Image (tube, coloured by chain):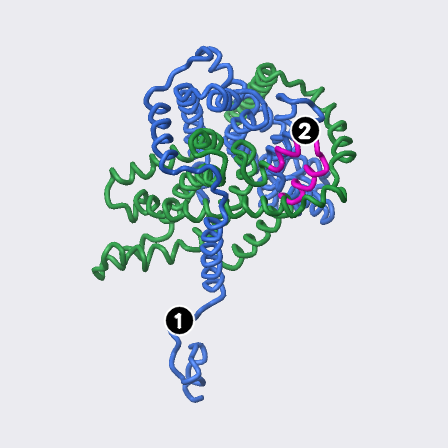
Amino acid sequence: MNEKVMRNQRKWQTILFAGIIIALTYLSSDITDFNIVHGIATLPDAAIWIFSNLFVTQESLERLPKILGKLAETILMSIAATTTGTVVALFLGLMGSKTTGTSNALAMFARFIASVARNIPVVAWALILLLSFGQNSVTGYLALFVGSVGFLTRAFIESIDEASQSAVEALRATGATYFQIVYKAVIPQCLPQMISWILFMIETNIRSATLVGILTGTGIGYSFDLYYKTLNYNAVALVTLCIVLSVIVIELMSNHIRKVIL
Amino acid sequence: MEAISISPHIKRKANGKISIKTGNKSERVMKWTISTLTLLTIMAFLFFNYDGLDLAKAIPETAYNLKVMFLEPGLSHFTWGAAFYQVGITLGLAFLSTILGAVIAFFLALMAATNLSNKWISKTVRIFVAIVRAVPTVLWVLIFAIAAGLGSEAAILGMLFHSIAYLVKAFSEAFEEVDKGIMEALKATGASWWHIVTHAVVPSTFTYLLSWTFLRFEINFSVAVAMGAAAGAGGIGFELFMASGFYFDMREVGLITYMILLLAIILELMSTRLKNRYFPATAK
């Protein structure tokens, strides 16, 4: 009897859940003017268009040096934003973690900064900074920097909380100072995790850098936008190919590093 | 020689002293990674394009803009109703691409999971997913925009591609962790592949699938904002782009930013709770 009631309840829950999902889907397609049939119908068109237009030709290959220069700028920008972001995030992480934090107010402050920096999208930062910093690498760098600080602080707080309790206590018992504890117990323990997060952030930043580049007119995003708007689709294909290859290479490299250190 | 034969497990230097630092591979790789990244960062700052940058002017201006944004937010080009409607559009874009992505990813993940499919299909799906993931979302959206026209369809298709790639990876990993015993027991009774999926795989992974889908929804919300700004997909992102790029109206930018921030924080709190509940190993 009891089992039957429970099974019934379960069934109703499932139906209710499915109903809510369907209602939300309907509502969403209504508000966004999305027609699923039409959407699916455009897929073959899109595929045909991609195969007939998006290929690299001899002519577009001439632009390769220029594109590679922009690509290098984008990759360097993402790495610089990540590493400098790491330095700031490390301090905020130490402040925000329960094991290494010195006061509650500071911890709250660190978590607040991280939350705001993370949750305001990179796009918003890019647009705001563009107004006064102008169209150059620094704008893109700063936008990525703010996002990196937000994300890495949260990741670092989690790694520090997780890793170092007993070693910190042991060192504290020997009378070690705060910086000795951080330098000898916390950092060595969390370093592999932190490097893993840094590599992840670099990957993410290279993808976002394309987006930021389109908005702020810098790096590879700008090249893409330029060729896209001048309908030079062969060059667009080349730019896309360059981005894909560099992202895959960086992902493989960081996977390899992760495998060794973790 | 004698010392070594007594304790063969202690590493010694050539002169017989015990070496205190055993530089193992992982330490070397970490040092190498850190120094390479530092070097690249220094290079980055040397090679940056500093055209038209005037720090002395840019910093106070940005500070002023930020002050106006966060302390005096307000609307001037559209009403509150319109603002909420635009937020609704962004949420709709995120929701549709997540839910459609989840459904498609479910089937692809069944093909990608090594315990449910054969080696070749699984490999093909994985490579396909890796390539899809390497193209940034905004490029997918812009490429689809040529075929489908600017608007919600291109945006949803573009975001869908990335959601599928992300969810296939997460789902197939969840499927691979399903208890082998349950599957073998079902197989022994003569259950078909589809029976195994619906009666063993789905019930034991359902909550994981739901939480991953929600986590992707959180990501898709900020992606949808970005697509509105960069690819003309509409929604609050587009309004943000117009307010800052065309009207230069910092107060409106501030209000839009607050709205996005509020929603993003709510979504983050919800997903953190989900993570703590269903993935205690990764969240804690």
User: Residue placed at 33% from the left, 58% from the top?
Assistant: A185
Name the element at disc 1. Answer: loop
Real-space CA distance between mark 1 and mark 2, rounded to the nearest whole angstrom: 56 Å
User: Residue placed at 32% from the left, 39% from the top?
Assistant: A110
Tag 1 and tag 2 share a subunit: yes
Residue type, label 1: Lys
Q: Which residues are magenta?
A: A223-243
Counting from the top left corner in percent of width and height, residue B241 is at 50, 24
Q: Chain of mark 2?
A: B
What residue is shown with label 2? Answer: B144
Majority secondary structure of magenta residues: helix
Between B108 and B84, the one lying in front of the other is B84
Between A108 and B59, the one lying in front of the other is B59
Whether B44 is among the magenta residues is: no
* Horizontal relation, residue A129 to residue A6: left or right: left
* Front of the two marks 1 and 2: 2
Counting from the top left corner in percent of width and height, residue B31 is at 45, 61
**Chain seen in blue:** B
What residue is shown with label 1? Answer: B21
Q: Badge 1, how many Cα within 10 Å: few under 14, some, many 20+?
A: few
Residue type, label 2: Phe
Q: Chain of mark 1?
A: B
